[in-house]
Structures are given as C-alpha cells and as structure tokens.
Image: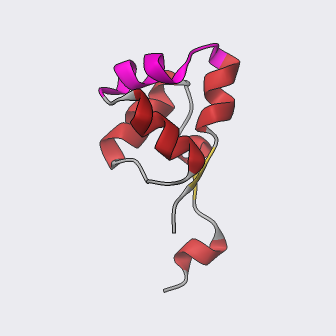
Amino acid sequence: MPLKNRVKEFRASKGINQQELGTLGGVSRQTISLIERGDCNPSITLALKTAHVFCQNVEEAFILTEDDYEG
C-alpha cells in the first residue's frame, strides 16, 4: 500500500513545479508525479530530500496510516 503524502500541497505552498522538485531530488518530473498520485513510494533517501526541501520532518510529508501497520 502506498504511503499517504502531502508532497503536492507542500510543493504548491513553495511555488515550485514537479520538474524543479525532481531536479532537487535527483529524479524525473514523472517520478514526482507518481509519488504525488500515490502510484509509487519514494526511496528513503528521496523522502528525506523531499522533506528537507519543504523544511519539514519526513513524517510531515509522508504519512503511514493504521492500516499500513497491519500485516
């Protein structure tokens, strides 16, 4: 199950587009789009870089729900 995320919200508040965020994270615009839609989960490194761009803790940008803890 994909992580919930606030990437699109944070990106809009910073006024940057998907291409710019991808460049900052070392990935493509398409990867950012997939993450925002919940179609893929970022690597730990990318999640940390993304949170750093937004001056947030990774837990603020990427959220695990109760369902994610059930095996």
- Position of residue 47 measured from the top left corner of the image (x, y, whole percent): 42, 41
Please state which of residues 36 and 66 is positioned toward the viewer in this rendering. Answer: 36
Report the number of discs: 0
Q: Report the colour scheme.
A: secondary structure
- SS assignment for the magenta stretch, majority: helix
Residue 3 shown left or right of residue 27 in the figure = right
Q: Position of residue 67 (x, y in %)?
A: 62, 76
Depicted 30 relative to depicted 2: above or below = above
Q: Residue at x 35, y 29 (%)?
A: 28
Q: Position of residue 18 (x, y in %)?
A: 51, 24
Q: Which residue lies at the image location 55% right of the left edge and 25% below the top edge?
A: 54
Indicate left or right for 39 with 31 as reference.
right
- Residue 52 at x, y percent in the picture: 46, 27
| Residue furthest front as drawn | 30
Q: Which quadrant holds residue 8?
A: top right
> Quick check: 10 above or below 19?
below
Write down the region rendered in magenta: 14-26
Q: Is residue 50 magenta?
A: no
Q: Which residue appears at 48% of the width and 44% of the height?
A: 34
Rendered residue at 61%/25% (across/down): 11
The relative height of residue 40 versus residue 67 in the rendered view (above or below) is above
